Amino acid sequence: MDVERKRELMMLYNETASVYDRRYESIQKYKHRWILRYLPRRMGSVLDVGCGSGLLLELLRPLSARLVGIDFSERMIRLARERVPEVRLVLADAESLPFTNGSFDVVVSATVIQNAPSPERVLNEIARVLREGGLAVLTSLKRKHTHITLRNLATSAQLRIKDSGNIPDSEDVFCVCTK
Amino acid sequence: MVAKPPISKELLEILACPMCKADVKLEGQELVCTKCGRRYPIVDGIPYMLPDELMAEVGTRSRR
């Protein structure tokens, strides 16, 4: 049934891609600025898991010359292509990342993990593609996770917690961790 | 004249098969897993690297 749910989500994001920015841009940008507080000013390779229409990629662009975004919605990834044409994009699923081990210095993911049928798999995949010492900054919806359950997912994936909590005035919890 | 590769060398170096995680190689407009042989199309410069169960959804419908 996981596959069914994922297919439905995929279709939903494809159908709503065009209205997504109008509806969520200001909410998402607020969370993105929160994520940015935990990131160095200059980064090596960075992966945005579930980049959607590329709002966060746009913010990250000045901070990394090796930026990659993945999303499983074809419509979303095409919107991202229009927004940030120079960023490398891959149509891919957060539970099955198409990257070799240790490919990234930094992984970010904003408001994505709550949608995964298996958040454990997403965290394991994020940990796998991070290099030793790499940094992950993740958020998920409060209605699905507390920052403690998000921490526990990261810990189970052998990541070390640096910080976690509620993003104030927002529907998300966050977790900052290293490998 | 040599045709421009559909994706950058830098991206190709870090891409892996989403199913078996082995390296992939570029063959024309497709990426091919060096282990299981699965093929992933590159559409307008974007590698389509979904796992089997999701690839079935977009693979045929969206490719022109």
Image (cartoon, coloured by chain):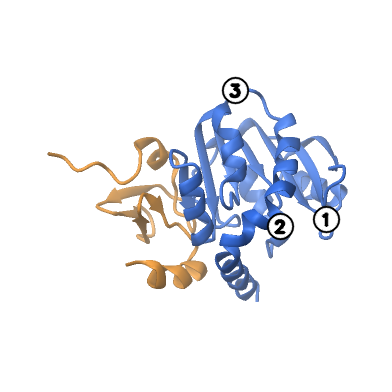
Chain colours: A blue, B orange
Q: Position of residue A88 (x, y in %)?
A: 45, 42
Q: Nearer the viewer, mark 1 or mark 3?
A: 3
What residue did someone put label 2 on? A119
What residue did someone put label 3 on? A42
Residues tagged by mark 1 and mark 2 found on one chain of the structure = yes
- Towards the viewer: B31 or B60: B60
User: Is residue B61 at least partly visible in the picture?
Assistant: yes
- For label 1, the SS is loop
Amino acid under disc 2: Pro
Identify whether B51 is placed above or below A65: below
User: Is residue A91 at least partly visible in the picture?
Assistant: no
Q: Position of residue B40 (x, y in %)?
A: 37, 58
Identity of the residue drawn at 61% across and 69% down: A12
Identity of the residue drawn at 47% across and 50% down: A90
Bin the neighbour count of mark 3 within 10 Å (Cα to Cα): few under 14, some 14-19, many 20 and up.
Answer: few
Identify whether B26 is placed above or below A43: below
Identify whether A169 is placed above or below A145: above
As drawn, which residue projects farthest toward the left?
B1
